Amino acid sequence: MISRTIPSTISLFSWIACALVLTGLLKQNRGSARLRPDGKVHFLLRWWFACSWVFIMVRFGFIGSSYLRDGLSEPLKFATGVLICIGVAGSFAMIPGTIVTTNESLEQVRWFWRTKRIRWTEIEEIVTERRGSAITVRASDHRKIIYTNVYPDRQRFLLEIKRHCGNNLPPHFPDEPNE
């Protein structure tokens, strides 16, 4: 009985996690950014979004490892397991991190990848979408930090860009109506 219940429960949690990730990707985060005493502003992910993403990737990791284990005699199963495990590693690297604004720079701190840092003086282009919620900040050496709807407080993010960039903003910034 328990041997049938555990896989069913894990499958149910996987579907719930998929629904939470899709909700996090499609629904705008209405939370607020966190202001730290040292003047930094942190734009954090929703905790349930990050946990659901990790749960799904761990689940796919187990699926990939079972293909690897079962496919030692069959090359196609082994190749499928390798590709699934590579996809899981890539997905862990793509988990959105925290965006931090400091007095010197705009930073994106990722969990399993290196931190991106763009100094305020290096910003060359800021692209805001009219209907979407993405804001792309591009540096002169083509590094970019993308603010999407998984982060909270879009208006505060735009305000921080205005505050730190001053008169160096593009003439059409912000390219959206005030909400």
Image (cartoon, rainbow, N blue to C red):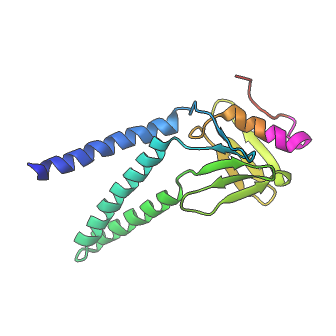
Give the percent coordinates (x, y) of residue 21. 44, 42
* Count of numbered labels shown in the rendering: 0
Residue 126 in the figure: left or right of residue 82? right
Q: Residue furthest bottom?
A: 73
Could you say where residue 139 lies in the image, as x and y percent from the top left? 78, 54
Q: Is residue 78 above or below residue 14?
A: below
The residue lying toward the viewer, choosing from 37 and 31, is: 37
Q: In this picture, is 151 found above or below 102?
A: above
Residue at left offset 56%, top offset 50%:
96
Quick one: which residue is furthest to the front in this view? 37
Q: In this rendering, would 11 be left or right of 155?
A: left
x and y percentages locating residue 129 in the rendered image = 69, 35
Q: Considering only vertical position in the picture, is 156 above or below 42? A: above
In-image side of 124 versus 178 (left or right) = right
In the rendered image, the residue lying farthest to the left is: 1
Between 31 and 169, which is closer to the camera in this rendering?
Answer: 31
Residue 8 forms part of the magenta stretch: no
| Image quarter hosting the C terminus | top right
Query: Which residue is depicted at the point 82% across and 51% down?
Result: 120
Which stretch appears magenta? 161-171
Residue sitting at x 39%, y 38%:
19
> Magenta-highlighted stretch: main secondary structure?
helix
Q: Position of residue 6 (x, y in %)?
A: 19, 50
Is 168 magenta? The answer is: yes
Q: On the picture, is 163 further left or further right than 17?
A: right
Viewer-nearest residue: 87 or 29:
29
The residue that appears at 65% across and 34% down in the rendered structure is 153
Image quadrant of residue 63?
Answer: bottom left
Which of the 4 quarters of the picture holds residue 118? bottom right
